[in-house]
Image: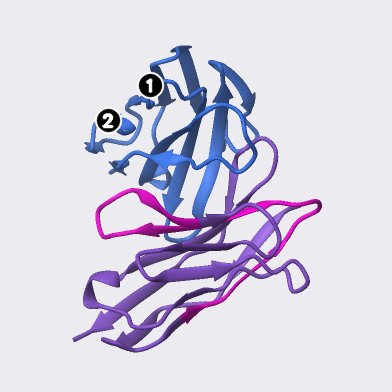
């Protein structure tokens, strides 16, 4: 079975440009998460969805960040305008419905560099 | 709020050495506990988990026991290999399934 698929794997962009990161969760999973990983702050949860509805976006750093999930098989994380401090690895993850303690499956990450 | 604290790295060991990476948590209620591993250039993979007190999770020779009395979930392996070199993350989840991670511990195994 295919895992969580993210694109692009690597992106280098100039400050001020719009960046869109994409994610396809595992089929049948109804939770989708966006995490950011940096050396300084470690792994931070940005936002998560359940059944395509945003449940908690308290980790979104500021209004420059937005996330959507138009259907069960696709989500985007957009940064506009991008800044150098947004440079990080962005992980999408998904998990199946139901029980407490379900495993969360991660994609391989999108490595973003803003210059 | 809920939090996870891991032993600081980096940790460097020789092959076949015994490994312990300490993890303690602060949470109300009864969280599920996880260890994830991240190999260089890759995403996180579940290594093992435990969903209730006294459960032991195990995988690939790694073990961790959910100790509610000490709020701990220490990771152990009896004999490490070079291929175990990675970053290890302890995490907890409650209810809504979102994970709260520790800061990660970088492990390097020398031949």
Side of B25 relative to A62 (left or right): right
Closer to the camera in the image, A97 or A46: A97
Q: Secondary structure at mark 2?
A: loop
How many other residues sit within 10 Å of disc 1, few (<14), some (14-19) or many (≥20)?
some
Tell me whether marks 2 and 1 sit on the same chain: yes
Side of B78 relative to A110 (left or right): right
Measure the alpha-carbon separation of dots 2 and 1: 9 Å
Question: Which label number is shown at residue A1?
Answer: 2
In primary-sequence order, the first of circles 2 and 1 is 2
| B8 is higher (above) or lower (below) than B27 | below
Side of B40 relative to A105 (left or right): left
Q: Can you tell which quarter of the image residue A84 is in?
A: top left
Residue A39: x, y in percent? 42, 60
Residue B104: x, y in percent? 47, 65
Q: Main secondary structure of the magenta part?
A: strand
Farthest-out residue, left: B111
- Asked if labels 1 and 2 touch by Cβ distance under 8 angstroms, the answer is yes
Looking at the rendering, the stretch of residues picked out in magenta corresponds to B20-48
Q: Measuring 43% from the left and 36% from the top, which residue is drawn there?
A: A93
Closer to the camera in the image, A16 or B8: B8
The chain displayed purple equals B
How many other residues sit within 10 Å of disc 2, few (<14), some (14-19) or many (≥20)?
few
Q: Which residue position holds label 1?
A: A27
Considering the image in quadrants, where does the C terminus of chain B appear?
bottom left
Magenta stretch: residue B85 in it? Answer: no
Q: Can you tell which quarter of the image residue A77 is in?
A: top left
The chain displayed blue equals A
Chain under callout 1: A
Q: Secondary structure at mark 1?
A: loop
Chain under callout 2: A
């Amino acid at each position: 079975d295919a895992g969580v698929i993210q694109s692009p794997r690597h992106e280098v962009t100039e400050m001020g440009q719009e960046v869109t990161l994409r994610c396809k969760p595992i089929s049948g999973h109804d939770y989708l998460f966006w995490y950011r990983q940096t050396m300084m702050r470690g792994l931070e949860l940005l936002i998560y969805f359940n059944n395509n509805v945003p449940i908690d976006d308290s980790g979104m750093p500021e209004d420059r960040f937005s996330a959507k999930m138009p259907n069960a098989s696709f989500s985007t994380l957009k940064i506009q305008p991008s800044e150098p401090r947004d440079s990080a690895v962005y992980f999408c993850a998904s998990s199946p419905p139901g029980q407490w303690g379900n495993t969360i499956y991660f994609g391989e990450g999108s490595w973003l560099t803003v210059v | 709020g809920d939090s996870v604290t891991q032993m600081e790295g980096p940790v460097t060991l020789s092959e076949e050495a015994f490994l312990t990476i300490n993890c303690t948590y602060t949470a109300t209620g009864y969280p599920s506990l996880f260890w994830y591993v991240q190999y260089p250039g890759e995403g996180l993979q579940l290594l093992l988990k435990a969903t209730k007190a006294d459960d032991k999770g195990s995988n690939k020779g790694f073990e961790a026991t959910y100790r509610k009395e000490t709020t701990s979930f220490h990771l152990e392996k009896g004999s490490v290999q070079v291929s175990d070199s990675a970053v290890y993350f302890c995490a907890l989840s409650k209810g809504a399934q979102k994970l709260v991670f520790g800061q990660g511990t970088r492990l390097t195994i020398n031949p």
